[in-house]
Image (cartoon, grey):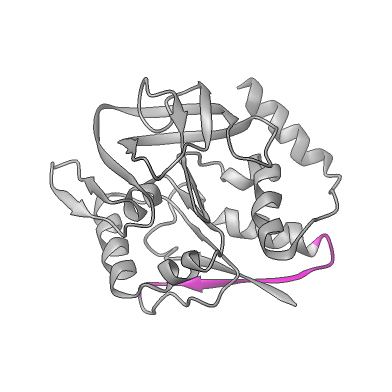
Amino acid sequence: MTVRIGLVLPDVMGTYGDSGNAVVLRQRLLLRGIDAEIVEITLSEPVPESLDLYTLGGAEDYAQRLATRHLIKHPGLQRAAARGAPVLAICAAIQVLGQWYETSAGERVDGVGLIDATTSPQPKRTIGEVVSKPLLDGLAEPLTGFENHRGGTALGPAASPLGAVRRGAGNRAGGGFDGVVQGSVVATYMHGPCLARNPELADLLLSRVVGDLPPLELPEVELLRRERLRA
């Protein structure tokens, strides 16, 4: 078995090294002797619905528009999520996969509709470290990342937050939560890349594809976590 990891639209949604999440997923499988490959899907091709899991990264307003149009026109990601394939969405990808989002110019854009969330600009941009207590079953360790966004995301009744914010803003200043969990989609405003800083989350996503995984002893990863949690 080769696990196929879809890196969705890195040509327009790759801000802040978010493509590294796919690399982390592949490497954590390879270290356990499980074959894995990254499949890059650009604007020149439709998103295949047959991959095992998917990652999407951050983007600016214009790139978000391009990504949204492409995913609506080619709904392979939506079909994959409907059958339960894990999807990791970072920052602007929350907005793209939501019901609608407003640009910085105040224009409302229909989203893909995979998650029950809407996003409007906040008065001020949020930049800095974010730490949250996980609210997703299967996670016990604090979640850590770097946020840089102006979007303020509100969740509808069908969606749940990924974590309760201890430091930083998360979905919106003063809101108290970060991220979205709905069906097979896990979304967060944490860059970093997110999965390099949160290996427990990486393994949870992978376990939904390959089943239980033996632990990895990687002291350098734990050192990174300790350093970032102190930042």
223 lies left or right of 75: right
The furthest residue to the front: 157
Q: Is residue 85 above or below residue 229?
A: below
Task: Find out whether residue 33 is within the magenta segment.
Answer: yes
In this rendered view, identify the residue nearer to me: 211 or 56.
211
Residue 198 screen position, x and y as percent: 65, 41
The residue that appears at 37% across and 61% down in the rendered structure is 12
Q: Quadrant of residue 153?
A: top left
In this rendered view, identify the residue nearer to me: 50 or 18.
50
The residue that appears at 46% across and 72% down in the rendered structure is 41
108 lies left or right of 138: left
- Tell me the quarter of the image containing the C terminus: top right
- Tell me the quarter of the image containing the N terminus: bottom right
Residue 204 screen position, x and y as percent: 68, 50
Q: Quadrant of residue 50?
A: bottom right
The residue that appears at 65% across and 29% down in the rendered structure is 142
Task: Find out whether residue 4 is within the magenta segment.
Answer: no
203 lies left or right of 68: right
Q: Is residue 224 above or below residue 34?
A: above
The residue that appears at 28% across and 51% down in the rendered structure is 99
Residue 160 screen position, x and y as percent: 46, 39
User: Which residues fall within the magenta stretch?
Assistant: 31-43
Q: How many marks?
A: 0
17 lies left or right of 198: left
Residue 6 screen position, x and y as percent: 54, 68
